[in-house]
Amino acid sequence: MELKGKRIVITGASSGLGREIMRRMLSAGARVVGVARNTEPIVREFGEKGAMAISCDVSDPRQLDAMLEEAKGLLGGIDIFFSNAGFGYYGPIGGADWEKIDKIFKTNVYAPIYTLEKLTEGGGTEPLTFVLTISGLGKMVLPGFTLYDSTKFALDGFVRTYRMEKPRNVKIVPVYPVALFTPFFKKAGGNDTPMPLMARQSPKVTAFIIEMGIRAGVRSIYPSLVFIIRCLLARVTPADVLVQLVEYPRFLAWKKRHGITEKGSD
Ligand SMILES: NC(=O)c1ccc[n+]([C@@H]2O[C@H](COP(=O)([O-])OP(=O)(O)OC[C@H]3O[C@@H](n4cnc5c(N)ncnc54)[C@H](OP(=O)(O)O)[C@@H]3O)[C@@H](O)[C@H]2O)c1
């Protein structure tokens, strides 16, 4: 797919992976609107390159409605939508905290599903490519990330089912990045959140591979070769068990540092 002149919206464009996707799309000659709650970093970094920014908390459907209207008004339509905003929690499950569960599901799961439905409601024949940042954790489990993992598994299930019923003019492209060097882990559990050892990548490289995948028109994007090999191995070996042998002790050490015992905080 040629990207020059395409009308593109990217959520989570102020930081990490979304920021690098934004950079690449602008370089490719696309017309781009970046979305985040705090748009100041988008304007500061990309304003002079012609990027537009809309402030929106994607966990609120009214703000999503308003953002989509504004983006369509600014661009005259949307050819590619990157649903990328998301966050994680690192820590033990338990405590029956409804607010916490609600917040992560609203942001990571409800927002992309609702956005796609809004973009396609009423039918229409205009082509739409909906690129959805899932995660390697939509395919594998990692201790400490129970809630986050469950949101990404939900998205993976959504994509697989949606593909069976979707309109012909809509293409959905799930992306499964591995651990990225972005502020994600720090935000999830503090400075000492262990980054998974198995596969790590820079957001720049990931964004480059995403761009290549979209240009080539692939169905799904797996930006890490290591993760592709892991997925193949998982079909014939207990690959997840091997990951747990390494990652579970690191989670226990993090809990100990944070004074969290099996019965709760000290
Ligand atoms: N980092 C990783 O290892 C990794 C691996 C696989 C997948 N992912 C996925 O990649 C995506 C981007 O993560 P990242 O690593 O780039 O994290 P990041 O650096 O923390 O960036 C997150 C972005 O999402 C925005 N955002 C968060 N909550 C939002 C909300 N309620 N409304 C609107 N925007 C919101 C943030 O901007 P504001 O705070 O200003 O709103 C920011 O621009 C996420 O979906 C994440 O799950 C990350």
Image: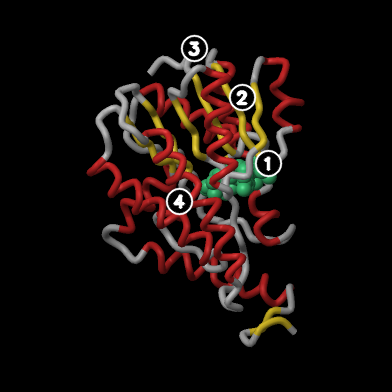
Question: Which residue position holds label 1?
Answer: 37
Q: Which residue is mark 2?
A: 23
Between discs 4 and 1, the one toward the N terminus: 1
SS type, badge 1? loop
Please, what is the three-letter code of the amino acid marked with disc 3? Gly
Q: CA distance from mark 2 to mark 1?
A: 19 Å
Beta carbon at label 4 within 8 Å of ligand 1: yes
Q: State whether label 1 is within 8 Å of ligand 1.
A: yes
What is the total number of numbered labels drawn onto the structure image? 4
In the displayed structure, does residue 148 sit left or right of residue 126? right
Q: Please provide percent x and percent y for residue 33.
A: 59, 25
Could you tell me how far apart the alpha carbons at marks 4 and 2 are, in whole angstroms? 23 Å
Query: Closer to the observer: label 1 or label 3?
Result: 1
- The amino acid at mark 1 is Arg
Q: Are marks 3 and 2 in contact (CB under 8 Å)?
A: no
Label 2 CB-ligand 1 distance < 8 A: no
Dot 3, crowdedness within 10 Å: few (<14), some or many (≥20)? some
